Image (spheres, coloured by chain):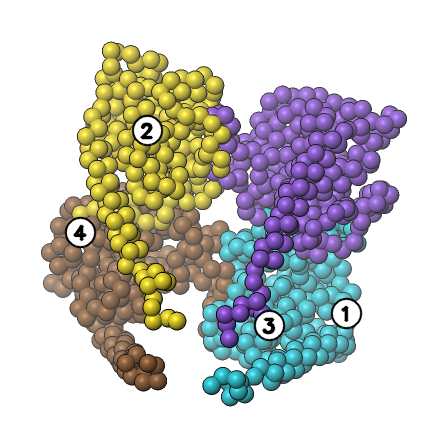
Chain colours: A purple, B yellow, C brown, D cyan
Amino acid sequence: MALIRFLERPKLEKPLLIEGLPGIGNVGKLAAEHLIDELSAKRFVEICSGHFPPQVVVESGLLRMVSNSLYYTKAPSVKGNRRGRWKDLIILTGDYQGLTPEGQYELSSEIIDLVKGLGVKRIYTLGGYGTQRLVDHPSVLGAATSPALVKEAAKYSVVFSDEPKGGIIGASGLLLGLGAVHGLEGTCLMGETSGYLADPKSARAVLDVLTRMLNLHIGFSKLEEKAHEMDQITAKMLEMGKRATETIPRAEDLGYIG
Amino acid sequence: MALIRFLERPKLEKPLLIEGLPGIGNVGKLAAEHLIDELSAKRFVEICSGHFPPQVVVESGLLRMVSNSLYYTKAPSVKGNRRGRWKDLIILTGDYQGLTPEGQYELSSEIIDLVKGLGVKRIYTLGGYGTQRLVDHPSVLGAATSPALVKEAAKYSVVFSDEPKGGIIGASGLLLGLGAVHGLEGTCLMGETSGYLADPKSARAVLDVLTRMLNLHIGFSKLEEKAHEMDQITAKMLEMGKRATETIPRAEDLGYIG
Amino acid sequence: MALIRFLERPKLEKPLLIEGLPGIGNVGKLAAEHLIDELSAKRFVEICSGHFPPQVVVESGLLRMVSNSLYYTKAPSVKGNRRGRWKDLIILTGDYQGLTPEGQYELSSEIIDLVKGLGVKRIYTLGGYGTQRLVDHPSVLGAATSPALVKEAAKYSVVFSDEPKGGIIGASGLLLGLGAVHGLEGTCLMGETSGYLADPKSARAVLDVLTRMLNLHIGFSKLEEKAHEMDQITAKMLEMGKRATETIPRAEDLGYIG
Amino acid sequence: MALIRFLERPKLEKPLLIEGLPGIGNVGKLAAEHLIDELSAKRFVEICSGHFPPQVVVESGLLRMVSNSLYYTKAPSVKGNRRGRWKDLIILTGDYQGLTPEGQYELSSEIIDLVKGLGVKRIYTLGGYGTQRLVDHPSVLGAATSPALVKEAAKYSVVFSDEPKGGIIGASGLLLGLGAVHGLEGTCLMGETSGYLADPKSARAVLDVLTRMLNLHIGFSKLEEKAHEMDQITAKMLEMGKRATETIPRAEDLGYIG
C-alpha cells in the first residue's frame, strides 16, 4: 500500500533531488531539514506507505500519518550565477525509512518513478558513516554512480574508497542504485559520525561539501548552534563517565578484604 | 486475503463509526463491547483477514474464524434530542488487530473503504494510553484530525498535547490518519491505564467523555462492576507483593554472616 | 507462489476430505498416513508453495520439493454398507504447514478452492491437543461448524467444550473456518497428547473415532506397533530421568558443608 | 520487485547452467567464481530483487546494486572433444541469496523461467555440506532429479544417500526442485565442509567432480593457493587454541586455595 498525494503541482525546471532521511547519527535528515529551512522549501508531495510503522504522529493534539515528503524550491540563488545543469531543487525527507528489506526496495522504487516523472536526472543522497568513536572534524565519504561523478566530488575533498565495507544500507544507497538502473546518476555523501547520538556537526560537514558543489548560498548558524549544544551534552556525558570511573573503588583499596 | 461478509444490509442514515479493538489495557475493546451491550447493537459485517493469527475460536464446541465485526444501532436515544449531525451508530470491535505493520495498514484501509461506502463521515476511536503506573482517576487524552474537533473535545476535559510521544500505534491511529486522507474526520480518545491489566475503569472514563459528547443515554453498572473486580484483584496482588517483600530477610538481619 | 499439479484426474463421487498435517504430537499426520496405507490411497495432487520452507527433501539421492499432497481412494468398504452421504475419500497430508500466518491463510484458502472444485462438501480435520503431561488413555476433543455436527460426534464420546482456550491453530482450524465461509461443513478431532513426542497412541484414538463415525474398515496393528515402540522409548526416558535424580546428592548428604 | 537486465544477448547453443551462490563454507560461490575466472566467462544478465538486502556495494567509490548475475562462455574446450549433449555454459553466482523463504522461492522461480527461456535443459548446483568438524579430504555428496543422473554422478565417486537429513536448503535445492517441476533435470554437488570458514578445499573437491563429469579443462592453482592459505590460518587458530588451553591453570595448580 502506497499513497502518494500532491499538495501542489509546481512547474519544475531541471530539478535536482537531494535526499536526507532518518539514519545513523540522523545526519541525512538533519542536513535535509536544515536545507529546507534555509531555502524556505515548500512541501508539495506526501508519501504514506504500508512499509512505515503503523502509527500516526501527534502534535498539539492534531494527528497525521507518518510519511516521507518532497519539498521544492524554485531556482535558489547560487554564487556567481554558476548553476551548472540544474535549476530547481527537490528535497526528500520524512519520519521513517521502510521497515523491511522489501519495503525499502518498494519505497525507493516508487520514489524513483515519482522524481523521474518530475524531470529529475541527478540525485544527491546524504547520510552518516558510523565510526564507533567520537569524531571532532568529520570527513565526508562518497560513493557515486559513475567515475565522472567520483572525479567531480573528489575536488571537494570527498573521500572515495571501498568503504563502507558493508555497503550503503537503506534509501541513500538504493535511490542511487535503482536510479542508475533507470538512467539517473548521483552521488552519496556520508559524514563521519560516532553513531551514538544525533550529529549536527556531521550534517554540517556534509552540507558544506554539497553547497560548495552546487554553489548554494545558505547560512549555517542554526546547525552550528545545534552542534554546539550536542558538544556540550557529549562533554557532560564524558565528564560523568570519568567521575563514575574514579569513584569505583579499585580492588587494592578494599582493605576489609584479606 | 480479506473476506468481508455482510450478515445483513441495514439502511443506515448519517452513521458515526466508533472503534474499540484489543490494545493496551484492552480499554478500547472493553468500551466498545459495553456500548454494544447497552445499545443492543446488532452484528452485521464480519471481517476475516490473512493478517490475523491463523486460528479459529472454539465456543461450546462450535468453531468460528477470528474476525473483526461491525455492529449497528438505529437512532439510539439521545438526551434532549440533541443528536447533532449523526443519526445511526456503527461500532467496530473484534478478536485481534493485524499482526504486522503491513497487515495493520491493509486492514485499516479496507475498513475505511467499507465504512465510507456505508456513509460514515466521522470516526471516534477508543483506546488506552499506557502510563506504567497505577492510576486511580484516569484522565482522557485526545488527538483529532482537525483543530475544530480538538476544540470540541476539549470542552469535555479531554487533554490535547504532544502525547503520546511515540505516536498512536495501531488501528485507533491509522483509521483516523487514513480516514483523513479519504476525507473523513475524527477524534481518538485514550484513557490513562497502567497497561499491566485489563482496565474497565479506564474504559469507563473514555465512555464517559464519548457519551457526553454524543448525548448518549447508557448505563455503566456492568462496567463499574468489572472495574470493582479489577480493583480487588489489584489490591490482592499489591498485598501479596508487600508480604513477599517483608519476608525477604534484609542484609542486617543475617547474623550468621560475619 | 503456489504450484498445484494434478498427477492424475480421478472421477470422484461425493468425496469427503480428511486432513492430517504435521502439528502437535504429529497426531494428524500419523493418522492421515495410517489411513493412506490401510486404504492404499493414491497420490493425485501435489501442492508446492512459497509459504513452505525453501528446501528440497533428499531420499536415496533423489530430491523432491517439500509439498502437501492429496490422496484418494474410491468407495472404501464400509461396515454393513452404511456409507451415509459420502462415497469416495480424499486425504490431505504433507511435509509442512505454511510458515507464516499469511501463508497459513493462503494455503488453506487455496486448498478449500481446490477441494470444493472436486465436489467436497464435508471435511474432517485431525490433530493433537497438547496437555503438557503424559496421557495413558487419550480422549478426543472436538470442534465443529454446526450444532448438528457437534451432536453427531458427541455420540462417539468426542468431548465438546470451550477448549482449546487458545483456539485451534493452523490448518485443522482454518480449513474448517474458511470452509464454513465457503459453504462447507466439518468437524475437527483432536487427540490428547503430551506434545513432547510423536504420539501414535493419540493418532489411534482419533482414528478410532473417525472410523466408527464413517463405518470404515481398517486395521490398526501398524499404528499400535508404533505406539508400543513410543511407550518403550518413553519408559526408558522416564527411567533415565529417575536414576539421574537418585544419583544427584541431596543437600543433607553433603557432609563437608557445615 | 525483480529487475532482470540483459547486458548482452549472446546466442547460446545447448547451454548447461552451473549455479554457485553464497552458502555454507561459501563452497558454491568459490567454485563458481573459480570457473568464471578459468573460463573467462562473461557477465550478461544482472538480477536485482527486493528479496536481497536493501543496500548497494561500494568498490573504489563506485556503487552498484547487490545482485545475482549470469555469466556465459561459448563452447569451452573439453578433453577429447567429449562434450556430451551440451555446448555452451551459463554460470550463476552473486552477492546474496533471497533473505526470506518467500524470497527464495520467488528468485528461484524467476531464474528457472529465465534460463529455460535461454534453452537450458540441465542444471548443476554447487554447495557445501556442513559436518561441524574439520575435514582434510572432503568427499562430495550428491542429490539429483532422476535415477539416471544419480547413476551418472555415482561413477565419479559422488556419494548418494538420505543426507542431508534436513534437506537441501536454499537455491541449490530449489533450482533443481522447481526446475524438475518445469521439465529441467539436474544434480546438486555438495562438498563436505566444517562450515566454520570459507572452504576453497571443498570447492576444489566439488569442481574436481564437475570438471571430470563435463570433461572440462581448467587449472586449479588459484583455488589450491587459497586452500593453502586457509590451511595455514586454520593451523594458526588451532595452535592458538592449544596454547590458550595450556596456559589456563588447572584446579590442582592453584596452591593458594586450600
Q: Distance between the residues labelled 1 and 4?
A: 69 Å
Of all chains, the one bearing label 3 is D
CB-based contact (under 8 Å), mark 1 and mark 3: no
Residue type of the residue flagged with mark 3: Tyr
Q: How far apart are marks 4 and 3 (CA)?
A: 52 Å
At x 61%, y 80%, the residue is D244
Q: Residue B206 carries which label?
A: 2
Of all chains, the one bearing label 4 is C
Judge the density around disc 4: few (<14), some (14-19), many (≥20) Cα neighbours within 10 Å. some
Residue type of the residue flagged with mark 1: Glu
Judge the density around disc 3: few (<14), some (14-19), many (≥20) Cα neighbours within 10 Å. few
Looking at the rendered structure, the secondary structure element under dot 1 is helix
Q: Residue C161 carries which label?
A: 4
In this rendering, position of residue B218 left or right of residue B251: left
Q: Position of residue A256 (x, y in %)?
A: 50, 70
Q: Where is residue B231 in the image (x, y as percent from the top left)?
A: 24, 40
Judge the density around disc 1: few (<14), some (14-19), many (≥20) Cα neighbours within 10 Å. some
Which residue in the structure is indicated by mark 3?
D196
For marks 2 and 3, give the one nearer the viewer.
Answer: 2
Looking at the rendered structure, the secondary structure element under dot 4 is loop
Q: How far apart are marks 1 and 2 (CA)?
A: 73 Å
Q: How far apart are marks 1 and 3 (CA)?
A: 27 Å
